[in-house]
Image (tube, rainbow, N blue to C red):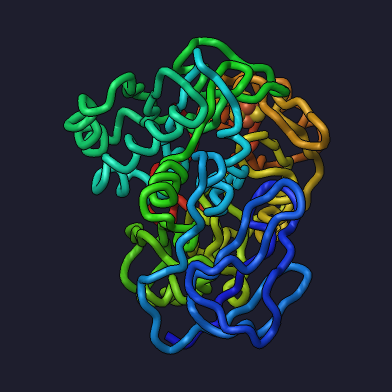
Amino acid sequence: MNFVYKFPLKMHVGVACKPIVNIGDTVKRGQCIAVPEGLGAKIHSSVSGLVKEISDTCILIQADEVQNDEYVKIKECNSIKDVCFEAGIVGAGGAGFPTHVKLANDIADGYIIANCVECEPVLSHNISLIEQNPDIVLKGVKYAMEAVKAKNGIIAIKEKNKKAIASLEKIITNYQSITIKKLPDIYPMGEERAIIHEIFDKWLEPTQLPIEANCVVLNTETLANIVKAIEDRKPVIDKDITVGGKLANGSKENVFLQVPIGTPIKEMIEKCGGIDGEYGEVLIGGPYTGLAGNLESDVVTKTSGGIIVTIAFPKYEDKVGLLVCACGANESRLRDIANKMGSEVVEVLPCKNIENIKGANKCKTPGTCPGQAALALQFKKAGAKRLIISNCSDCSNTVMNSAPKLGLGVYHHTDHVFRTVDHELTRRL
Ligand code: SF4
């Protein structure tokens, strides 16, 4: 190993961390290198090596030639919440919300919900983890229940993941008060409010958090990180990730468990044989919410879910309208795609289910379409010949029932990703 590992100072919701090492310092794997100065989470080095550079945004560490699995353990703590703080645990599903803040709640009559939905197609490292080690997920739920004094735990998982469900069912009787809720395979079933709606048949307002339904929702890998922090005193230094797409070793997804944080994404792609010829973009994240990454500078972080290399975009040098979803690509991502296709954007409209809350788009009822026909008409009037949409499964279905009748072509922003991996396109249900 002879790489430079990059540790962004903000891999979480909140403010950037403050470095506590200096250039030229030697560090050990697991050593804390940056601390939060407000809402945030500690950052630990995933490698032993030499601090090479420190900037406002990251710390670069030149890794020692030889690495091993040993790490500096976090200090002993009196509470599960404090363990999570010391270990720098954040929502590993992409949100990056500090876990110690979630576990500071007291919900004696509430629920811990394990978000095992792995909502984004292609990504499969969470389901792989459950199949291989269901015990760590159940234990994580138990510890989280203890932390917030919740009497019940629920594993929310898509019904299609039969092998993972069977692994859980085999041992769930060892755990009291934890049940499994099977969910349909539609997008965005992993959205927290969508999960709560499926379980309790009640929609939270877009302004409300799960805690207002007496729930704390934690992602699969986050639960595993809680167990490792409590039982092995291990900080968050490794990340599970899926790599797939236009790769020399084939387009089938590759699951890597426990990749050192800070690893260059280029290195992960090389592990899969490298990029197979011409490509469109390197997507960091899943097909719906991922963003175009930079092959030279992006690294695996605490919240990275996927690395997907796509085929080239189709050329469409004509007028397009952008239909923006709160749970898929935002306007900027859709504009980026339109630009890469050579299209001229003549209209941008949000799904009418969107509410803007403090500058962020939130859906009132994620995954339940409010109707899109009126918007299709508006796009037509604006001169669009084609729509680029980022809608959920239900709304894409509705768009397909109206736009083509008006002579409008439809490109879903996941199309080039799904064509790369031979996955069904987001169109009709
Ligand atoms: S209802 Fe609209 S905003 Fe909500 S998930 Fe579907 S497309 Fe997105």
Q: Is residue 129 visible?
A: yes
Q: Is residue 112 left or right of residue 280?
A: left
Looking at this view, is 100 or 390 the one in front? 100
Residue 421 x %, y %: 39, 55
Q: Nearer the viewer, residue 359 or 29?
A: 29
Q: Which quadrant of the rendered structure holds the N terminus?
A: bottom left
Residue 117, given in percent of the width and then of the height, sits at 42, 35
Residue 268 location, x and y as percent? Answer: 44, 71
Residue 171 x, y percent position in the rendering: 20, 32
Q: Quadrant of the C terminus?
A: top left
- Please tell me whether residue 63 is drawn above or below residue 59 in the rendered image: below
The quarter of the displayed image where residue 356 is located? top right
Q: Residue furthest top?
A: 201
Residue 38 or 355: which is nearer the viewer?
A: 38
**Left or right of 415 on screen, residue 168:** left
Q: Residue at x 41, y 56 (%)?
A: 240
Residue at image point 52% right, 54% down = 87
391 relative to 402, above or below: below
Q: Is residue 281 visible?
A: no
Q: Quadrant of ligand 1?
A: top right
Question: What residue appears at the point 76 percent right and 25 percent down from the top-left corner?
Answer: 355
Count up the numbered dots: 0
Tell which of 240 and 423 is nearer to you: 240
Residue occupying the point 74% across, 58% down: 16
